[in-house]
Image (tube, coloured by chain):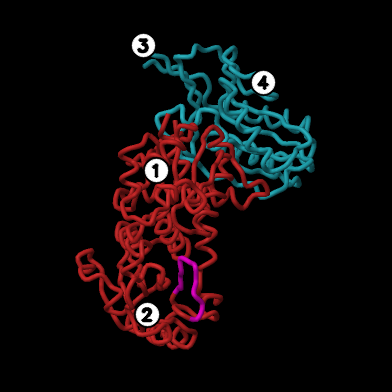
Amino acid sequence: MQSLTLLDGQKFQITIQRLCRQLIENHDNFSNSVILGIQPRGIYLSQRISEELKKILPDANILSGILDITFYRDDFRRKEGPLVPSSTEIDFIIEGKKVILIDDVLWTGRTIRSALDAMLAFGRPEKVEMLVLVDRRFSRQIPVEADYIGIEVDTISSQRVVVTWAEADQKDQVILLSED
Amino acid sequence: MSETVQKLSTRHLLGIKDLTTRDIELIFETADTFKDVLNRPIKKVPSLRDITIANIFFENSTRTRLSFELAQKRLSADIVNFAASSSSVSKGETLIDTVNNILAMKVDMIVMRHPYPGAGVFLSRHVNAQIVNAGDGAHEHPTQALLDAFSIREKYGDVAGKKVAIIGDILHSRVALSNILCLQKLGAEVMVCGPTTLIPKHIGSLGVKVEHDLLTALNWCDVANMLRIQLERQDIKYFPSLREYSMLYGLNKRILDSLDKEITVMHPGPINRGVEITSDVADSKQSIILDQVENGVAIRMAVLYLLAGQAS
């Protein structure tokens, strides 16, 4: 297995800060916008984003939740067993709000499709946007695209893109794993 | 990646006997998430949308049938209901024939209650569908035991180390056996209490304490699970009168208040108010009877989800 680092160190932090600035451009002081991190791996990015936003906008009330999509996936009974669900924590109303869905990697688009379904169980937002740290281009199986993208990478399906986080995996980095 | 696949060790849920401790924990962890789903404005997820489940009840039921039905609907499964009293069973059809005819209509899973012990095991050997036992005679009632233990876990944080007294008609109770097995697998201590005639002779071999005095049992336990006297299964008289039973084994507020600690009161339903438990106890703060009912739906959703997920 070959490992190639795509993003780490200062560049990683700058990318997150840039994503925050782009969000502020469109969402102003977040009075009508909420953030939803997708379980299990999107929650670290959504946490970073909301912490960073609070630094930039100390007076704003940034609402941030986490969304589990396990029961909405389209591959139930098509795997060797059921996936273990994670928790969902949405302590606010999303009806009529602008929702920013956050995940670490956008690949086939199927996770986002499930997330849209899962989110609708909590109400009808005014608008939904998508923010990802890594966009694996040209690999979509479903017609969805992200509105805010950290980095774009071109990959083949046998490769894996892994995002690790300091709080969970010791180091902030994006790596590309290829088979030898 | 942190997306993990976890399976039960069994394809059917026939009894607690077949489950490992890890299976029970997995069911509880999954039920936690479903309980969360049940408290949302939209209490439904699409997981089982391509699955058809038949609820076959050869014996009467209110709570269990409703609870299974709701669990199935919350998971978006298609369901058919079948009650023996209104079916061709009364025309002499055998169990296997009845079930195979239902399966021929492309049903994936069977939830069955039957008056004969082992009916679920028998069926699982002869038909090609996943079977969930919703009570077989005086043998097992696994989902009831799971929801009881889940309710204890919810109340105390953990089942291990807790002392649970099962009080009443142990002899005719499927809830008792499943509860004993489930609680022991989770590390709780179990005592059964009731008149000698209503306690099976060799129940001590299951590793439970046996007690015939209600007050001693109540003073010992953290949780008292009061069972109903199953008059419909009693072919002979096991005690002189209901009044006498109620005087010796009925739980009332006076006894509850006389204990030097606050115990939790459970009941699997249906309650015979004034027999095994008085109204003021059933409706008191110490009773978690309605929590048990609420948890029943979440537990059954977890069981159906985990079983359905492993069959492709």
Q: What residue is drawn where x is 28% and y is 73%?
A: B199
Q: Position of residue B72 (x, y in %)?
A: 54, 45
Q: Amino acid at mark 3?
A: Asp
Q: Amino acid at mark 2?
A: Leu
Reading the image, the residue beneath label 2 is B218
At label 1, the amino acid type is Ile
The subunit letter for the residue under badge 3 reads A
Q: Amino acid at mark 4?
A: Glu
Identify which residue, B213 or A24, lies in the foreground: B213
**What distance separates the C-alpha of mark 3 from that of mark 2?**
67 Å
For label 1, the SS is: strand
Q: Are marks 1 and 4 on the same chain?
A: no
The secondary structure type at the circle numbered 4 is loop
Q: Colour of chain B?
A: red
Is tag 2's residue or tag 1's residue first in the polypeptide sequence? 1
Pointer 3 residue:
A180
Q: Where on the picture, by quarter, is residue B128?
A: top left
**Residue at (60% x, 31% y) in the render:** A114
Question: What residue does disc 1 label?
Answer: B131
Q: Are marks 3 and 4 on the same chain?
A: yes
Label 1, residues with CA under 10 Å away: few <14, some 14-19, many ≥20: many
In the image: residue B284, left or right of residue B218: right
10 Å crowding of disc 2: few (<14), some (14-19), many (20+): many
